[in-house]
Structure formats: structure tokens, C-alpha cells
């Protein structure tokens, strides 16, 4: 049993891993996890046995091997974080009996194990530090706001039946704008890519996140020519065809409205989402 | 001009960098940036880090922000002992995994409790409603359980038998809610034992020295903070606290 990658391409971190593995010809088995279909509450209502362990998705590996150190939080009965965290079950990597979560960790592991070209995570310690710096900053900044556009424009209406909250969207877009300004000022500047003349993990992680608002109709590249140019370079560097294939789902997000969302999941998440709208 | 580390020991990531550099005898110039005086928002500091955050590093003309990046840079430049960031592929991955997960979890919830229980009351002169503090405490407890179950488990340290960057980063974050008066180690003996081991591994005296300021933070009163800053901090923190989408990480 070789390398397995548990991914749902609706998720940005999953896309960065997918693109990275494919563009570097890393052999892996694609384990498709459909976040909105694979209910972690179990396929049947918990009539017979209270907490039925999930039978789908990567947490199967946790159930089988509790020492695997899988960090993705399991299904939880507590309010708020527990329920939302079920959506953080991807990406997960399984390499024999080694299980790993967290996008950055997975990308770094793959780059090391498969000796990918140096530019992805340069051996020069200053350039490497610049990649680390970006990957760290990205979490609390770009990743704090970009994903929310999808929640507000698509998922919340889908789950709760309520129209999208426009003031929230404006708040999010403003936050995203600030982050983008810092991105251009501090990280990209006048360079072709974040660390200079070649693409690295930093660019890949950034671009997949910025495609989320694009997918839901908030085209952040529209009035940002420098960013647009950078995007074009990144697409070319990984391969345009691969890039679009990875983004097919998110770019056709309207189709999501036709997805059969597991009714238990919907029931579970709707009140939590409603609370968040306030 | 050698290595400069721009730090305020009130900040958890700054303490991690400080302790790491000191316990590895890395020569550096300690450049104090007092957040409460707004020194991170000066033009001079902006030259070091345009994002106006600490910790920051300057090594000749090379500047670097983000504590994890700084820690990793230091391990490489000064070739610190392997256990800090092991060369073994899987162990290294475990450190990366923790450092990534902790941002939204241990760091996120630990800070939230500190801000809710201590910082905002200092800035505004009044406590927040008790449900807010209870809520923040509950959220921290959820991630503490996850930390114990998934990361620490029954091992002496997160990645096995030796301390690594993961343990250091974890412990400095947990000291923040402790400084706010929430003694989370009291009811969690496994964590308390782990804490003792981490303190011993870096050196008890160094650990205590690094935490002196934050542990005396209760004595900070609003008038120690520059007035124009007080308002700025207040707005920032209240905004962060009320942001209902903080939990969404899809």
C-alpha cells in the first residue's frame, strides 16, 4: 500500500497538495473525500448505539490506529468548534502506517521524501526562511478571510436557507483587501514569485486560497494587475491544465447547490451557522 | 552588526524565540520593542518589519518575521542539536504538524482567554460578562484535551523522548492564560508533568526569567499604556473577539 492522499478539491489546502503531488509526479492514491456528503455522524441515525464511529473519510485511520497521531479533531459532541471542525478532516496523508494532517506539514513531508526540485523549498536558508515566513503569515491573514467568501455566498444560504448576509461579506472583503495589500507590499513586491524568480510552496499555498473567492464570484484579481500577472505565472509554472483541473469544482460552485447534502450534517450545522450570522 | 532579535516578552512567540536563542547560546542583540508603548508602530521598527509585529529578526540586511520561520532559521543557521527540529522525516513532520495546528487551536484559544479575562478588562476598566470568560475557558479546554490526546499522548514530549520546537512553542502559549489567572495545569497532571520536563530541558531559570513580565501582567494598569494606544488596542481586540467567523477554517 503506497502513499494515500485524502482530499476534497473544494478545500484550498487539498488543492495545493493535489497540485504539488501531481506537478512533481509523486505517485499517490487519490482518496476522494466529499465533505458535504460523507457525514461524520454516521450514515444511520444514532438510534441503536449512541455515538456511532464514522465509517467514511480519513478518520477511519484514527479509529484503527489511535497512536497514529492524526491531529484532525474527531467528531465531537460539543457545540461550536467541534461541529465545524468536522470539516477539517482533510487533507490527510497516509504513508504506510504513518498518518499526517495539516497542509504545511504534508507539503514539506512530500518535498523532502520525494526530493522535489529545490525551488519549492530552497536549501538556501534565507530563501527557505522566506517560504516559512509566508506559510506562517498566510494562516492568520489570507486564510482568515478568503474562505469566508464561500461560506457567506454559498454555504450559509445552502445550509440555512437564509440569504447571504451582505454586511458580513463587505467586512470580509475589506479584511481580505488589507491582507492582499500586505501580500503585495511585503511578500510579492516586484518579484516574479514570492521568493524571487522561481515558484515555491509559498506561491502555491497562496494561489489556491485566492481562488476561493474567485470561485464564488468575488474576483479579487480584477483590479489588481500585479496579482493577476503573478497568478498567470503560477498557473504556467504548475501547468495550466493541472491548475484548472484542480479548480474545476470550485469554479463550478453553483453546482454545489445541487449537491445532496447529508441531511444529518445539514441539521447539525444549520443552527451553528445561524448563530455565526449574528 | 550581528544578529538582532526584536522582542517583547509579553508576547508568547517572542518568548519562544528568546528561550530558544538563549538556551542554545546563540549570540544576539536583544532589541526591546514595548508593545504597550506602541514601539512596534514606529517608522524605525517598520524598517525591520513592515507588518509591525514582533518577533522580528534582523541578520545583516536580512529581515524575517513570524516566530516559526525565525525559530527554524535559527536552528539551521546555528546548527542547533537535532532534537529541536529532527532530521528524521517523520519526526520532523510531527513538529511541522503541531506548529501548524497550534495556530488556530492552542495559540488561538489561549490568547482568546488571556484577552477576555485580562487584557480587555485592563484596557476598558471593566470585566467582560462572565459568560464570555466561561465560553473562552471552555473553548480552551476543548483544545487542551485534543493536545493531550493527539499530540502529547503518553510520551514525555510531543515528538518522543526529546524536547523539540513543538514543546517550546506549546508551553509559552499555555503560559498566557496562566498569567491571566487560569491555572490550567492544576487539573491536568499529565500536562503539569510535561511542563516540568520542558522547563528543565530549557533551564528553569531561563524559563522563569522569560516569563517574569507576563506573570506580573496583573499589575499592569491602564495608565501604563499610552492613551492613544489604549483606544487602538481596545478597538482591535474587541473587533477580534466579536468576529463570529474566527472559527471557520475551511
Image: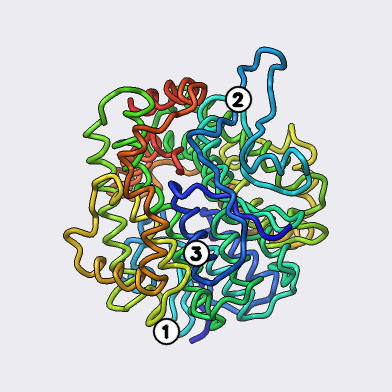
Q: Residue at x 66, y 36 (%)?
A: B183
Residue at mark 3 = B7
Could you confirm whether marks 1 and 3 are on the same chain? yes
Chain letter for the residue marked with disc 2 in the picture: A
The tag on residue B96 is none
Q: Quadrant of residue A179?
A: bottom left
Residue at mark 2 = A43
Taking the image as shown, residue B193 lies to the left or right of residue A128, namely right
Image coordinates for residue B211, horizontal then vertical, percent:
62, 53
Q: Earlier along the polypeptide chain: callout 1 or callout 3?
A: 3
Image coordinates for residue A93, horizontal then vertical, percent:
63, 54
Q: Secondary structure at mark 2?
A: loop
- Residue furthest left in the image: A223
Residue at mark 1 = B61
Please state which of the two labelled residues, at mark 2 or mark 3, is closer to the viewer.
Answer: 2
In this view of the protein, which residue sits in the foreground, A11 or B187?
A11
Chain letter for the residue marked with disc 1 in the picture: B
Question: Would residue B111 be visible to someone looking at this image?
Answer: yes
In this view of the protein, which residue sits in the foreground, B128 or A176?
A176
Q: What scheme was used to colour the molecule?
A: rainbow
- Residue furthest top in the image: A47
Chain letter for the residue marked with disc 3 in the picture: B
Amino acid at each position: 500500500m503506497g502513499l494515500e492522499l485524502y482530499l476534497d478539491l473544494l478545500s484550498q489546502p487539498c488543492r495545493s497538495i493535489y497540485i504539488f503531488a501531481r506537478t512533481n509526479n509523486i505517485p499517490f492514491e487519490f482518496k476522494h473525500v466529499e465533505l458535504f456528503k460523507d457525514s461524520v455522524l454516521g450514515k444511520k441515525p444514532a438510534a441503536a448505539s449512541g455515538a456511532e464511529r464514522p465509517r467514511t473519510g480519513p478518520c477511519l485511520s484514527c479509529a484503527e490506529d489511535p497512536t497514529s497521531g492524526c491531529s484532525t479533531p474527531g467528531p465531537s459532541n460539543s457545540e461550536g468548534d467541534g461541529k465545524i471542525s468536522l470539516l477539517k478532516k482533510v487533507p490527510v496523508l497516509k504513508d504506510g502506517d504513518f498518518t499526517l494532517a495539516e497542509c504545511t506539514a504534508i507539503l514539506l513531508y512530500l518535498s523532502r521524501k520525494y526530493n522535489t526540485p529545490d525551488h519549492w523549498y530552497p536549501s538556501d536558508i534565507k530563501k527557505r526562511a522566506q517560504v516559512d515566513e509566508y506559510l506562517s503569515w498566510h494562516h492568520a491573514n489570507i486564510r482568515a478571510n478568503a474562505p469566508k467568501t464561500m461560506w457567506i455566498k454559498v454555504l450559509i444560504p445552502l445550509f440555512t436557507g437564509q440569504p447571504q448576509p451582505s454586511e458580513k461579506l463587505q467586512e470580509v472583503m475589506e479584511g481580505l483587501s488589507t491582507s492582499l495589500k500586505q501580500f503585495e507590499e511585503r511578500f510579492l513586491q516586484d518579484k516574479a514569485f514570492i521568493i524571487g524568480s522561481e515558484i515555491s510552496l509559498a506561491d502555491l499555498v497562496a494561489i489556491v486560497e485566492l481562488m476561493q473567492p474567485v470561485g464564488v464570484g468575488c474576483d479579487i484579481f480584477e483590479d489588481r494587475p500585479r496579482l493577476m500577472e503573478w497568478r498567470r505565472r503560477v498557473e504556467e509554472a504548475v501547468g495550466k491544465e493541472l491548475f484548472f483541473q484542480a479548480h474545476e469544482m470550485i469554479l463550478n460552485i453553483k453546482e454545489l447547490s445541487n449537491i445532496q447534502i447529508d441531511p444529518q450534517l445539514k441539521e447539525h450545522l444549520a443552527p451553528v451557522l445561524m448563530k455565526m450570522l449574528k | 552588526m550581528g544578529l538582532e532579535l526584536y522582542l517583547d516578552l509579553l508576547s508568547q512567540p517572542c518568548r519562544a524565540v528568546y528561550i530558544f536563542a538563549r538556551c542554545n547560546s546563540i549570540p544576539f542583540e536583544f532589541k526591546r520593542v514595548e508593545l504597550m508603548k506602541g514601539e512596534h508602530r514606529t517608522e524605525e521598527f517598520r524598517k525591520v518589519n513592515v507588518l509591525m509585529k514582533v518577533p522580528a529578526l534582523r541578520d545583516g540586511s536580512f529581515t524575517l518575521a513570524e516566530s516559526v520561520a525565525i525559530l527554524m532559521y535559527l536552528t539551521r543557521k546555528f546548527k542547533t542539536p537535532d532534537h529541536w527540529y529532527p532530521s528524521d522525516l517523520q519526526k520532523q513532520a510531527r513538529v511541522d504538524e503541531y506548529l501548524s495546528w497550534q495556530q488556530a487551536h492552542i495559540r488561538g484559544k489561549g490568547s482568546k482567554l488571556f484577552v477576555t479575562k485580562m487584557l480587555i478588562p485592563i484596557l476598558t476598566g471593566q470585566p467582560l460578562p462572565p459568560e464570555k470568560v466561561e465560553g473562552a475557558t471552555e473553548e480552551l479546554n476543548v483544545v487542551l484535551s485534543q493536545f493531550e490526546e493527539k499530540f502529547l499522548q503518553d510520551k514525555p514530549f510531543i515528538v518522543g523522548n526529546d524536547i523539540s520546537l513543538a514543546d517550546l512553542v506549546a508551553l509559552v502559549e499555555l503560559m498566557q492564560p496562566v498569567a491571566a489567572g487560569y491555572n490550567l495545569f492544576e487539573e491536568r497532571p499529565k500536562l503539569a508533568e510535561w511542563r516540568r520536563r520542558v522547563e528543565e530541558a530549557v533551564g528553569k531559570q531561563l524559563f522563569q526569567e522569560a516569563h517574569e513580565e507576563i506573570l506580573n501582567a496583573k499589575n499592569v494598569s491602564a495608565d501604563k499604556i499610552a492613551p492613544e494606544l489604549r483606544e487602538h488596542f481596545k478597538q482591535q481586540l474587541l473587533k477580534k473577539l466579536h468576529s463570529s467567523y474566527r472559527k471557520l477554517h475551511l
